[in-house]
Amino acid sequence: MELGRDYFGPLWRFVEDEEITDIDYSGNEIWLTNTENERYRAEEGFVQKYMTAGFVEQFTQRISNVVSRQFNKRNPVLEAETEELRVTILHESVAKSGRTISIRKTPPIIRLTAERAVAEKFCPPELLALLINCVLVKMNLVFCGMPGVGKTECAKFFSQFIPANERVITIEDTLELRYGKTNPGKDCVEMKVSEDVFDYSRAIKSSLRLNPKWIMLSEARSTEVRYLLESWSTGVRGMTTLHTDDVRNVPDRILSMLENRTDADRMENDIYQALDVGVLIRKRRVTEEGMSLQRRYIDQMCFYERRDGQNRIVMMVQDGVFVTQELPQSLADKFARAGISQPFSWDRVPGKGDGRWE
């Protein structure tokens, strides 16, 4: 589905601005979010001049026609997707500040690079190397944090290091990972789920028949996590994102998603066996060249381990710095078997130039 300039009218200037990632109209104000995760109001007078009742109604009708769905009190949510945009509109009967419009850009690009990660202190080079090597030895990773911190962007970046001949299946309700576009030539199947026709649980179970080496779930949010863990326990590798503010909360967060206490009791050990790596991303305000900016950074990183009948969480990074660089023996052995003698060192990103930190 294509939505061009004519659909967006005065909002098009924000849509085509590559520095803007989100456009949110609350019924009386427009707030914009840029690539640095800074949030600010649109220029003074823009709403009064352009966001008239007539334009808002016209825009809504255009979107409604494109997706062939009614929009009224009985159908108060209208959603549409393009290759690079997701549009959500809420009816004024449920959005009391007035009709609400949210436009999120989902372009098939990876904004995070190894160079930026180090230069902008997203993480120390040794941690970047360690996480890249975790992907190379086929560990399962979960990226955590609050909404808007860049969990999906982080997963997109590290997914680049999956070998081209290892089939990756992505499962999402809104296409944001864009693995096929950001990793051209690699073996990939992209699944789009819908609640009423093809839900997450069914997608995960179906994906196992497609010879996957990796399953990437855009977000673990409900009972489908049980099928994801089961798939990982069979030897399929994967990545997902999760809403939590501490990597040590991940097992309990997953257990809370299960349908009943019996499932939770039975699966606690399975979680520690299936999960390998937890990464927590936060935002902090920094001053650069006299300007106050918000920067994302990796606040925590840990390993999950089940050994000798015990479940363990081994914290490697806390508050953005290493608390230890001593790997659990089972994980050190895993790196060694893969021929990686120095897990905290990384030679280069394939096709991205040299990045030696020896």
Image (cartoon, helix red, strand yellow):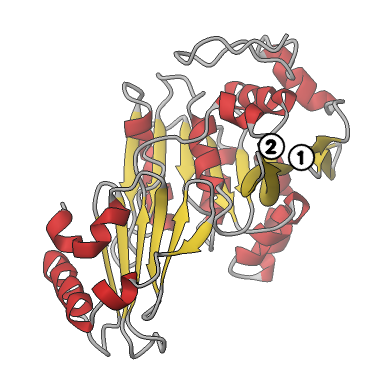
- Labels 2 & 1 near each other (Cβ < 8 A): no
Q: Quadrant of residue 122?
A: top right
For image coordinates 34% across by 91% down, the residue present is: 93
Name the image quarter holding residue 45.
Answer: bottom left
User: Residue 50, relative to residue 27: is it above or below?
Assistant: above
- Residue 3 visible within the image: no
**Residue on which the image places disc 2:** 276
Q: Residues within 10 Å of mark 1 (few under 14, many from 20)?
A: some
Helix, strand or loop status at disc 2: loop
Q: Nearer the viewer, residue 300 or 218?
A: 300
- From the viewer's side, name the closer residue of 117 and 344: 117
Residue 302 — which label? 1
Relative to 226, say whether 41 is above or below: below
Q: Which numbered disc, 2 or 1, marks the residue closer to the eye?
A: 1
- Structural distance between the alpha carbons of marks 2 and 1: 8 Å
**x and y percentages locating residue 132 in the rendered image:** 61, 24
